[in-house]
Image (cartoon, rainbow, N blue to C red):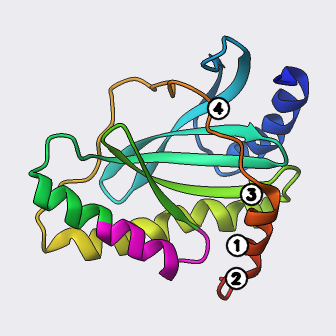
Amino acid sequence: MVNYEQEKQNLEVAAKHLDKLKVKYEFVDLETAEGDKFPAIISTYDYKKMTFDLHIVNNDDWLCVKCLILDTSELDPELACAVYRVAMELNFELPETTFSANDGFLFIEADMKVGINFEDFKQEWDSLNEGLDQVVEDLGSKKVQLGIVSDELEEPKEKPAKKKAAKKKSAKKKKGKKK
């Protein structure tokens, strides 16, 4: 069961941080597969001359930022496999970001504790840029074009699966050096 009001309140903290960063966003209501409504923030993330669709949701004690970076469904299967390999290897090399895949799309993600202060939020937000730097460098030789976005903000189809807090805590302990 979604605690809509609490999740909206948690996302409002992220919205204040986005305001400080001068990032445009909008609140939307989405639905789970079971039909429960939950709040989300949709926005875009600018990286060099590319713009990516992004959304932020509250998942228990975590704010989850998910940024769509590539539609792999049109790629040759061998190339798609190489792209996923790069992304999975980067999951172990980059301390603040995670790459994930769903329905033929590749995402970069950053998760942060609910109630995060601005400085830590900015560090997590900037980690998307660092992750994109690395994926662009690693995929550059494969001639893969990143930057799949729509002209309008897109809403994610459903809420991400619940994450286990213990797994996330251990992942946060493995963080590399801070900026």
In what element is the residue under mark 1?
helix
Instruction: Please give the label number shown on residue 72.
Output: none
Residue at the disc numbered 4: 41
Q: Nearer the viewer, mark 3 or mark 2?
A: 2
Q: Residue at x 83, y 31 (%)?
A: 7
**Real-space CA distance between mark 1 and mark 2, rounded to the nearest whole angstrom:** 5 Å
**57 vs 81: above or below:** above
Q: Where residue 48 sits in the image (x, y, percent)?
A: 35, 60
Which residue type does callout 2 highlight?
Lys
Q: Where residue 121 sits in the image (x, y, percent)?
A: 73, 59
Q: Which residues are magenta?
A: 85-96
Instruction: Please give the label number shown on residue 171.
Output: 1
Q: Please report contact status of discs 1 and 2: CB closer than 8 Å, yes or no.
A: yes
Would you call the spot at circle 3 few (<14 residues within 10 Å), some (14-19), or many (20 or more)? many
**Real-space CA distance between mark 3 and mark 2, rounded to the nearest whole angstrom:** 14 Å
**Real-space CA distance between mark 1 and mark 4, rounded to the nearest whole angstrom:** 25 Å
Q: Is residue 176 left or right of residue 144?
A: right
